[in-house]
Image (spheres, rainbow, N blue to C red):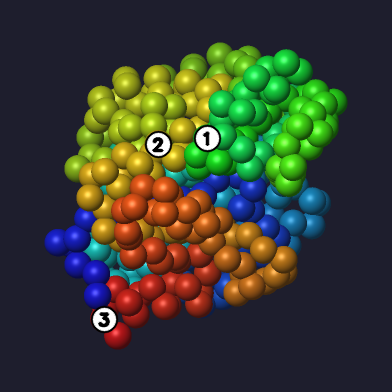
């Protein structure tokens, strides 16, 4: 059974964890989820449920639609969980991977869901319009892969684990990096990611320049919940000016996810609950598994810090986690 006396971390996945039918199970079963999707559609001016559940025009993997859809799904999972637990479990820390940082800010009540939707809508549009390139994940330490990446004009886009580094660059440049890595290191096979550009690298500078104007209009509030910053690897200041600046730099700097988890664990986190998204070969929500679970488990081994990990990404996992929270 979890209580507010424990130090709890809420985490949210980023782009790449979207899938067709995402959220359909929640809306079939819970009025709370239907209200979240209705609000999102009203704010964005299009049917978020249709794109997420059916994707009739194959738009879900376009960045401008992926980001609002994932934010909506994450918050729907969170709101259903809160409703089923009478909102009696509060996080001490909220963290999100890349796009998930916006879900974390909503969960911490540092920004409203409506404002976050408008931000990620513009963020996704700008990243799709001005960005270019692709991304690959390498099962390698940053010090090993960085010199090879930079030799071919690619850049570090994320540090997920001590032995997992994400690289961004043009497709042809990434292919050269992948080739040299496979020639130089045995069994270090990269994986291309489902993204529409080389996010969190210099390829996003132009998008960030335009996004800065959008960020300056956003309202951020003080929060009792600490929110992780992908840009610094530490926590956001509660100062709205600082939050805007870190979200600006986040667009074209590496996601320091391992540092985010190290910082959270160093602050005594005892339990982690992941909300939203899903990965795996299943075509329906119940067949999906959590996006960040593997990284969190490997971080426990790397740091020696043990946490109780749970997820709330679909109806079965939400019900299971609610039972654990309530001690059933």
Mark 2–mark 3 distance (CA, rounded to whole Å): 32 Å
Q: Quadrant of residue 3?
A: bottom left
Kindly report which numbered mark, 1 or 3, lies closer to the viewer in this rendering: 1
The CA distance from mark 2 to mark 1 is: 8 Å
- Residue sitting at x 34%, y 52%: 304
Q: Are marks 1 and 3 in contact (CB under 8 Å)?
A: no
The correct choice, above or below, for 33 with respect to 132 in the image is: below
Rendered location of residue 106, percent (x, y): 37, 45
Dot 1 lies on which element?
strand
Q: Is residue 275 visible?
A: yes
> Along the polypeptide, which appears first: circle 1 or circle 3?
1
Which residue is located at x 79 percent, y 57 percent?
56
- Residue annotated with mark 1: 159
Report whether residue 106 is seen: no
**Left or right: residue 143 compared with residue 238:** right
> Relative to 190, is 165 on the left or the right?
left
Badge 3 marks a residue whose secondary structure is loop
Q: Which labelled disc corresponds to residue 327? A: 3
Q: Nearer the viewer, residue 49 or 99?
A: 99
- Give the mark nearest the N terminus, 2 or 1: 1
- Residue at 32% from the left image edge and 59% from the top image edge: 306
Pick out the residue farthest to the bottom. 328
**Picture quadrant of residue 226:** top left
Residue at 24% across, 75% down: 1
Asked if residue 301 is positioned above or below residue 193 in the image, the reply reads below
Residue at disc 2, secondary structure: helix
The 10 Å Cα crowd at callout 3, few under 14, some 14 to 19, many 20 or more, is: few
Number of numbered discs on residues:
3
Nearer the observer: mark 2 or 3; the answer is 2
Residue linked to disc 2: 259
């Amino acid at each position: 059974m979890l209580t507010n006396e424990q130090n709890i971390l809420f985490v949210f996945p980023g782009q790449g964890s979207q899938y067709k039918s995402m959220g359909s199970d929640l809306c079939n079963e819970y009025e709370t989820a239907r209200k979240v999707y209705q609000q999102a559609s009203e704010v964005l001016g299009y049917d978020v449920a249709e794109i997420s559940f059916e994707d009739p025009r194959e738009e879900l993997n376009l960045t401008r639609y992926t980001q609002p859809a994932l934010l909506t799904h994450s918050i729907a999972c969170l709101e259903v969980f809160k409703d089923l637990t009478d909102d009696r479990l509060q996080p001490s820390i909220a963290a999100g991977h890349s796009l998930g940082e916006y879900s974390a800010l909503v969960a911490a009540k540092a920004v409203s869901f409506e404002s976050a939707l408008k931000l990620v809508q513009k963020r996704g549009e700008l990243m799709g319009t001005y960005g270019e390139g692709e991304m690959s994940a390498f099962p390698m330490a940053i010090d090993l892969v960085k010199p090879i990446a930079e030799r071919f004009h690619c850049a570090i886009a994320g540090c997920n684990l001590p032995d997992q580094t994400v690289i961004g660059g043009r497709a042809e440049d990434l292919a050269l990096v992948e080739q040299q890595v496979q020639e130089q290191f045995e069994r270090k096979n990269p994986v291309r990611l489902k993204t529409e550009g080389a996010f969190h690298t210099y390829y996003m500078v132009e998008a960030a320049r335009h996004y800065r104007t959008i960020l300056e209009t956003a309202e951020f509030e003080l929060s009792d919940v600490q929110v992780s910053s992908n840009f610094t690897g530490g926590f956001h200041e509660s100062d709205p000016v600082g939050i805007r600046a870190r979200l600006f730099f986040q667009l074209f700097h590496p996601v320091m996810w391992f540092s985010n988890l190290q910082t959270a664990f160093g602050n005594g986190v005892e339990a982690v609950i992941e909300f939203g998204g899903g990965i795996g070969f299943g075509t329906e929500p119940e067949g999906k598994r959590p996006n960040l679970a593997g990284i969190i488990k490997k971080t426990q081994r790397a740091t020696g810090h043990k946490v109780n990990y749970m997820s709330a990404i679909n109806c079965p996992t939400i019900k299971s986690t609610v039972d654990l929270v309530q001690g059933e």
